[in-house]
Amino acid sequence: MADPILLARHGDTECLLLPALANRHGLVTGATGTGKTITLQKLAESFSQLGVPVFMADVKGDLTGISQPGNPGEKLLATLKDRGIAPPEKLACPTTLWDVFGEQGHPVRATVSDMGPLLLARMLALNETQAGVLQMVFKIADDHGLLLLDLKDLRAMLQHVGDNASQFTTQYGNVSAASIGAIQRGLLQIEAQGGDKFFGEPMLNIADFMQTMDEAPTSPAAPAPQGDASALGSGPALRTGLGVINVLAADKLMNAPRLYATFLLWMLSELFETLPEVGDLDKPKLVFFFDEAHLLFKDAPDALVERIELVVRLVRSKGVGVYFVTQNPLDIPDTVLGQLGNRVQHALRAFTPRDQKAVKSAADTMRAKPGLDIATAITELAVGEALVSLLDEKGRPSVTERVFVLPPGSQIGPITPAQRQALMANSLVAGVYDQPLDRESAYEKLTGRAAAAPAGGGGLAAEAGGVFKGGPAAPAPAPADGGLLDGLKDVLFGTTGPRGGRHPGLAEKAAQSAVRSMGSAFGREIIRGVLGSILGGGGSRRR
């Protein structure tokens, strides 16, 4: 049985997080600057010490210090002494750095097909009609064996479906050119934000988030990693069986909040879909921290919120604990908030009506303690102080305690660029994801068929093997003789375009002018007869 995590204390009062109930999820809330990040770091390193892997997004760029031993400053030591808390034992956690853009960590990629139309529609902020068209495009690609791996595959597929909409209408439904254009514009925005680096291969193996490491020996030889996934390379650790902490560099990613939120939702969905049912364990298999959680639900359609609620509710039985970190508890929908059993509430500032509502909501949802006015206490909490209610051994929320969160033993603050490079070089996944892979997929197949098609015949719709029907055949070339007479005839009597449109010649224009000058019905009938004889009987005549 894993030892409880001592999270906070005040005098003789201690708040213990039971590892067996850590997969009942949790919530850390509070205004900016009240200590949420320190609480997150303390929780993460405590899980790591128990051998539980952790994933967390580093929104502000200061969580990488968890990989280095701490060195408390004089101000912190003085605060701890004043609160009657002993300085923490110095420790460091094995850490793997990740970055969607591949700059501050190992690249993280997903294929377009694996992301799916629902999450992609969320990322592109599509309306219901546009999302339906995107789902249709995915279905057409699946039915015809066209892989959607990166954004250029999706763009090529959208262009193909738009150019050949009439061929798909009867089987898949109407294809709106306006919707195709809106999706393409959304993809351009994602590319401008660097999102094209996220889509592609090699795709992240979610098992690489769930690893432990043995104690690093004094010799240069690398220890063998332990856990659910094979890996390459090695990295430093201080004890046997420490859970690897996966830190996603999200400071730049936050400039594209929809991409950030969709990426985290995709990872949570991957965990839900790939991990087996394990029931109740003595400790979680993985703990997942969602920082800036309000971005997950902002402007999210009901279908997506229902999906998040379902995943949060059911992923518990797969051994995963999910902890949301946000400023305001009102940021979390009630259906999700009800699933979060472990609560840490830092100070809230009741300066606005919404803040006052948030204070009341937070106070009403925490278990009352006689003699403690929770609503008043929330506005009076100091930095590092919190109201804590954790699940007891019977799964019941404990009474709310006003306590001080213990500081982490690892470094508080970011690491240096040299330390970052050393972590990446010695990582368990060093060399696994660094080089992108671009194999044959929808883009190559569609553009290759277009290049192989005869001029004027079918465009992207022309496919070898007959998967899609080709366009109209190229017109037969004009004979070499008679070219001058044919040109003169076109000038005098006009031409018919490839789509049936008329381009009038000089004689026809003169006749039309005559029509406009004749006011009688008799004159108009004569002109119709003249035009009919000139154009080979093409004119319509009333009977």
Image (cartoon, rainbow, N blue to C red):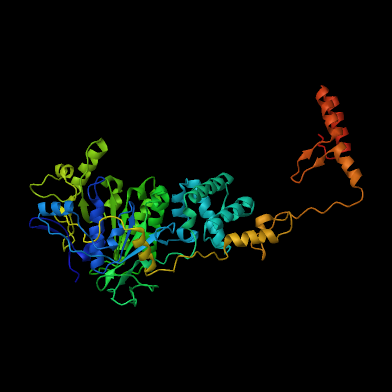
At x 74%, y 45%, the residue is: 499
Give the quarter of the image for residue 469: bottom right
Judging depth in this view, the residue of 5 and 408 nearest the camera is: 408
- 174 shown above or below 317: above
Judging depth in this view, the residue of 82 and 184 nearest the camera is: 82
Quadrant (top left, top right, bottom left, bottom right) of the C terminus: top right
Quadrant (top left, top right, bottom left, bottom right) of the N terminus: bottom left
At x 58%, y 49%, the residue is: 175
Asked whether the viewer can see residue 484, the reply is yes
Q: Position of residue 298 (x, y in %)?
A: 37, 46
Number of numbered markers:
0
Q: Position of residue 2 (x, y in %)?
A: 20, 69
Judging depth in this view, the residue of 208 and 383 nearest the camera is: 383
Asked whether the viewer can see residue 272, the reply is no
Judging depth in this view, the residue of 228 and 101 nearest the camera is: 101
Give the quarter of the image for residue 408: bottom left
- 371 shown above or below 14: above
Q: Position of residue 375 (x, y in %)?
A: 16, 43
Q: Position of residue 496 (x, y in %)?
A: 80, 42
